[in-house]
Amino acid sequence: MYRILLFFSALLLMAASAPPPAGNPAVPVALLKYNGGGDWYANPTSLPNLIDFCNRNLGTNLDKNPATVMPGSDEIFNYPFIHMTGHGNVVFSDQEAANLRTYLMAGGFLHIDDNYGIDPFIRPQMKKVFPELDFVEIPFSHPVYHQKYDFPKGLPKIHEHDNKPPQGFGLIYQGKLVCFYSYETDLGDGWEDFEVHRDSEETRQKALRMGANLVQYAFTR
């Protein structure tokens, strides 16, 4: 179950500015498929576009085809970085919550992106994963905002929903940020193909750069 630990050598490559050596196996990342009826499959072009951006601009070697993984599956330990999105309900069984907890304790990283409407559902479910932890707002000085791309004011605002400022929340386990929750920004919409939302290139670049920061942080913390 702890196969994720075998990725440590691969994770170091994520920080390299040069392309990875020829023949180095691609590092897989995944989209979380959860129960409860929420649209975990929203924004289908988001993660592939972020992967492409990271490979071109960070020198990473991420597998261009993201996988889909369930929170209760042993396969989750194959993916150092997991992205989660949606608008609606989320339900983790006790077994799924325990498995996700083990994954995060073992070195995995979860990015939750509120696609508008997931907030009241994801908070109690993540409380099942870490009953002893609460989401805390991540200060603008945190390294996650200062990787290759600098975001001195925290998360960029990508889409407007409730006239609220964007906020980045996190779960801190033993001093490490293991889960980053982007709220009231909709980063994934900014990663999508231009034709989907027709965001300006400036807006899309902000979203992709912040996403790249999350990937780089997850692989170098």
Image (tube, rainbow, N blue to C red):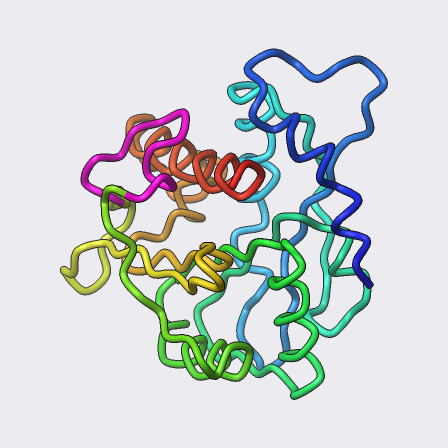
**Between 119 and 148, which is closer to the camera in this rendering?**
148
Q: Quadrant of residue 2?
A: bottom right
Q: Quadrant of residue 156?
A: top left
In the current view of this chain or complex, which residue is farthest to the front? 174
In the rendered view, tell whether residue 88 sits above or below residue 54: below
Residue 102 position in % (x across, y down) = 67, 69
Q: Is residue 144 magenta?
A: yes
Residue 74 position in % (x across, y down) = 81, 66
**Between 104 and 42, which is closer to the camera in this rendering?**
104
The residue that appears at 53% across and 27% down in the rendered structure is 53
Q: Is residue 90 left or right of residue 124?
A: right
Q: Quadrant of residue 95?
A: bottom right
The residue that appears at 57% across and 80% down in the rendered structure is 37
In the rendered view, tell whether residue 161 sits above or below residue 71: above
Q: Which residues are magenta?
A: 142-154
**Between 198 and 27, which is closer to the camera in this rendering?**
27
Number of dots carrying numbers: 0
Residue 126 position in % (x across, y down) = 49, 76
The residue that appears at 28% across and 50% down in the rendered structure is 159
In the rendered view, tell whether residue 201 sits above or below residue 76: above
Q: Is residue 113 magenta?
A: no
In the current view of this chain or complex, which residue is farthest to the left? 163
In the current view of this chain or complex, which residue is farthest to the bottom? 94
Residue 211 position in % (x across, y down) = 45, 39
Q: Is residue 41 left or right of residue 188?
A: right
Q: Which quadrant is home to the N terminus? A: bottom right
Q: What secondary structure is the stretch in magenta mostly built from?
A: loop
